[in-house]
Amino acid sequence: MAMTVATFQPKTLRPKSPYLLPNLPRRVCNFKAFSLHNPQLPSLVGQFEPTIPIERAGTPPSSWYTNPSFYSLEIDTLFYRGWQAVGYTEQISNAGEFFTGRLGNVEFVVCQDGDGKLQAFHNVCRHHAMLLAYGSGRKSCFVCPYHGWTYGLDGALLKATRITGIQNFNENEFGLVPLKVATWGPFILLNMEQNVDSDPGSVQNEWLGSSAEVLSNNGIDTSLSFVCRRDYVIECNWKVFCDNYLDGGYHVPYAHKGLASGLNLDGYSTTMYEKVSIQKCEDGSTERKNDFDRLGSKALYAFVYPNFMINRYGPWMDTNLVLPLGPRKCQVRFDYFIEASLKDDRDFIERSLKDSERVQTEDVMLCEGVQRGLESPAYNIGRYAPTVENAMHHFHCLLHRSLTE
């Protein structure tokens, strides 16, 4: 049977069309609207009171970490709003390079088009909803593996196969649905909302606020070279991993004895900003058993709300992106970067990664143990250690604000 192919001249997709609406992320207007369909949620959210000082405050209840309806509320109110870290600029440093990802129910693809412009789209064919691309790589266009519809790197529909006889069809209304995309330093950010300002100054202000200068001045920049990526699927709610990160080093001497020997925990300090908390550990031990030193004399651990962590220590930077996979499962993506002078030192890199892997294995055990405890009838609400768990309390207060806006 002969195949009829329609081809179109590339055009940038920016139509206002009802055909775009079904592909947008599922959103509710606000907490009140969501609660109409989930009447138990106000009670769950109200069990944490952010105005109580940390010295007298209780932690969020275990239901925040176990309840499926609460998890759905978080996806809508946290991850479909604001700027979200999704990758790094080295992934798409050349024309045609792309990578894909998923956040909640949103499948996305980020690419550099032929003009060197950063682009991002819902990774969904407009014909019958097939995913267009998988993983990462380099392409001159996106061809749907289902029926061959083809899209340019600018999102425009270039070719639709076997549509002879179709009526009321405007190819300009069937390009890929765009997403807002921006960069800060080495990081690529997406925003699922439509009417947001992607000007660099506005993005920096919303994502990092007044912490941006601190991060820039502490080596969070594009000068480092990417080394590798490691993914961990953990049987815990995504917030359990964040809480573990934000306890001000409280657990380090008990759970990470190897790491503790290289850090001076008495020099630990925590500073909170608008949506960021920065933990610093100054003056690590200079008495090494050998010349191997991956930590250096100071370390900086930055948590960017709601789910991104930046760790800068010695010649290294690693980032941790926590992706919710369900009420009791998450994926944590570690990307490792190193200063250019050491990028070819394979022995140093392998030894460093081995040490890091040991710490992550220990953290996986902790997080999965906490999740099982949260699901036990013996636990509901805990307390904070006021001198060290300030960043964790700050995180919970930001959560409450996002959930109730």
Image: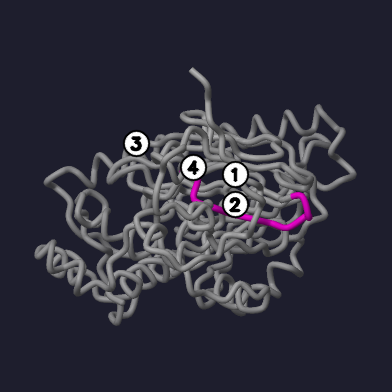
Question: Could you tell me residue 301's position as x and y percent?
Answer: 60, 58
Q: Are marks 1 and 4 in contact (CB under 8 Å)?
A: no
Question: Could you tell me residue 9's position as x and y percent?
Answer: 66, 51
Crowding around mark 2 (Cα neighbors within 10 Å: few <14, some 14 to 19, many 20+) is many
Q: Are marks 1 and 2 in contact (CB under 8 Å)?
A: yes
Crowding around mark 3 (Cα neighbors within 10 Å: few <14, some 14 to 19, many 20+) is many
Q: Earlier in the sequence, mark 2 or mark 3?
A: 2
Decide: is 300 above or below 327.
below
The amino acid beneath tag 2 is Gly
Q: CA distance from mark 1 to mark 3?
A: 38 Å
Query: Is residue 227 visible from the viewing direction of this image?
Result: yes
Question: Could you tell me residue 235's position as x and y percent?
Answer: 34, 36
The magenta span reads 114-124
Q: Nearer the viewer, mark 1 or mark 4?
A: 1
377 vs 267, left or right, is left
Crowding around mark 4 (Cα neighbors within 10 Å: few <14, some 14 to 19, many 20+) is many
Q: Nearer the viewer, mark 1 or mark 3?
A: 1
Query: Is residue 287 visible from the viewing direction of this image?
Result: no
Q: Secondary structure at mark 1?
A: strand
The residue located at (77%, 46%) in the rendering is 95
Q: CA distance from mark 2 to mark 3?
A: 37 Å
| Residue that badge 1 annotates | 151
The amino acid beneath tag 1 is Tyr
Total marks shown come to: 4
Q: Earlier in the sequence, mark 2 or mark 4?
A: 2
**Disc sitting over residue 235 in the figure:** 3
The residue located at (37%, 57%) in the rendering is 25
Q: Quadrant of the C terminus?
A: bottom left
Q: Secondary structure at mark 3?
A: loop
Q: Earlier in the sequence, mark 1 or mark 4?
A: 1
| Residue that badge 4 annotates | 332
